[in-house]
Amino acid sequence: MRRLQIGFLILAVLPCWAVADDVVRVAISDSFLRPGELTEYDHAVLSEVLERTRPDYGGYEVRPFTERVSLARAVQLAIEGRLVNLLALGVGEPLPEREMIPVPFPVDKGLLGYRVALVDRHSQDRLSRVDNVEELRQLRVGQGSGWVDVRIYEHQRIPIETTADYESLVLMLLHGRFDLFPRGLYEITPELAVHGKRYPDLAVEQHLLLHYPFFEAFYVSRSAPRLATRLTAGLERMVADGSFDALFAQHFRKLLADLHLRQRVVIELENPYLPAWVPLKRKELWFDPARLP
């Protein structure tokens, strides 16, 4: 996260005579990432997009917002647009969908919809015998209260336990309240690194890969429509010249290889809650583990 802060400071430095055509106000922290905040990868994408669009959109300034706030508060601030005007969110959160401008692009190529689970390491043998959604329904999954994912598992008739606190979910898992704590592919490794030190029985499940259409998108305050247009234009340029795929591979190649995705049993789940603007038919925008080397 220290590198992320330095990157934002570099972006924010402008000569005293310069005028920023776009001011990007983003939430960051110096600790464990919270919903709405930009990851290091998000920051790299944002930086590239803003540079790619400088010739026709002009200069820019990135102003980090570092106050610790809840997701609900971050969304409210972004709707207002004064302190925060850009969030990175899993698609489908009701309030941002209604009150902000979604940039119609899967920034993470849909990685957030591929789920590997945190488990109690003693349960791996039993979980290795699960091969389809019917067998998955004999287990219980854990998720945070209010997470968009909860509705997806409920739609699939998969038993689910919820609570508002992340650490409580870990403790519930290790005490047998549920069997799987599915996490996004780029969430699970850092989360295990943080919580595995305190809970040595916490492990990454080795057999299953759950998938439903889901992803991270940039959401822009309605007070900054030009910024939303600029981000869309820059992302499309990166797709067209191949630099988006190259940046994605640079950040995620090792992580994806370490999770051994091609050796896992994939269980497909429906997500009937996607907004209409999601570009599902544009296959070039989406990650596919079958295409991994």
Image: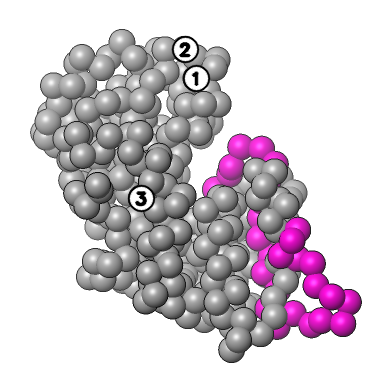
**Considering only order in the chain, which callout, 1 or 3, is on the residue closer to the N terminus?**
3
The answer for how far apart the CA atoms under marks 2 and 3 are is 27 Å
Residue 257: image location, x then y, percent: 33, 38
89 on left or right of 91: right
Q: Which residues are magenta?
A: 9-35
For image coordinates 45% across by 33% down, the residue present is 189
Alpha carbon distance from label 2 to label 1: 5 Å
Label 1 sits on a secondary structure element that is loop
Q: Which secondary structure, mark 2?
A: loop
The tag earlier along the polypeptide, 2 or 3, is 3
- Mark 3, Cα crowd under 10 Å, few <14 / some 14-19 / many 20+, is many
Residue 267 placed where, x, y %? 17, 40
| Mark 2–mark 1 CB contact (< 8 Å) | yes
Task: Kindly identify which numbered label has been placed on residue 196.
Answer: 1
Instruction: Please give the residue where the numbered disc 2 appears in the rendered image.
Output: 200
Q: Is residue 140 above or below residue 76?
A: above
Left of 118 or right of it: where is 80? right
Query: Within 10 angstroms of label 1, few (less than 14), some, or many (20 or more) residues?
Result: some
Mark number displayed over residue 111: 3
Which secondary structure dominates the residues rendered in magenta? loop
Above or below: residue 84 compared with residue 203: below
* Residue located at (27% from left, 14% from top): 123
Total label count? 3
Q: Tell me if residue 219 is in the magenta stretch.
A: no
Residue 215 appearing in the image? no
